[in-house]
Amino acid sequence: MRVKFSHLTILVVLASFASIIYGFSIKSEQVLLGHRFIGGGTVGLFLVAMPLFLIKESRGKQLKDYMLTKENIEKMQNQSGEKTENQ
């Protein structure tokens, strides 16, 4: 069975949230271990899950379409000018 990026991302997000919740629940008894679980969950969210999500969502898209170049600025100005003329 082939694992998709979306399944892997969801698994990492759930594991990270579980780690953070577990860290907060044991923080009153074992402070150092609680902080480690909270930090590990945070790292999992921002350094593992977010890049996986961005890779999945940006696949097949051209980066230059989203950059603010001179020709993209001109396209936006032309489109806004056409909208104001039509109103």
Image (cartoon, grey):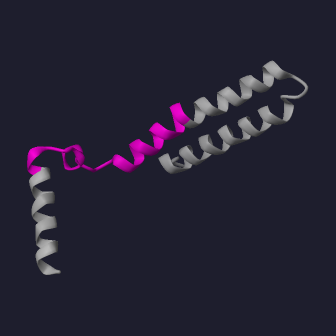
Q: Residue 35, how many percent across, how many down?
A: 74, 24
Q: Residue at x 66, y 33 (%)?
A: 41
Which residue corresponds to the image point at 79% horizontal and 22% vertical from the top-left?
A: 33
Q: Is residue 64 above or below residue 38?
A: below
Q: Position of residue 66 (x, y in %)?
A: 24, 48
Q: Residue at x 55, y 49 (%)?
A: 7
Q: Quadrant of the C terminus?
A: bottom left
Of residue 72 and residue 11, the one placed in the foreground of this image is 72
Toward which corner of the image does residue 24 lie, by quadrant?
A: top right
Q: How far across and down, in percent of the image, does residue 81 sit?
A: 11, 67
Q: Is residue 16 magenta?
A: no
Q: Is residue 79 left or right of residue 52?
A: left
Q: Is residue 46 left or right of residue 28?
A: left
Q: Is residue 59 left or right of residue 3?
A: left
Task: Give, as a single range, the part of the protein colored magenta.
Answer: 46-71
Looking at the image, the residue that sits furthest to the top is 32
Residue extending farthest right: 29
Name the main secondary structure of what is drawn in magenta: helix
Task: State the image coordinates of residue 59 (x, y, percent, origin top left).
Answer: 33, 47
Tell me the quarter of the picture where residue 68 sits.
Answer: top left
Give above or below for 62 relative to 82: above
User: Which is more toward the observer, 83 or 54?
Assistant: 83
Using the image as rendered, state which of residue 45 and residue 3 is in the foreground.
Answer: 45
Q: Is residue 31 above or below residue 55?
A: above
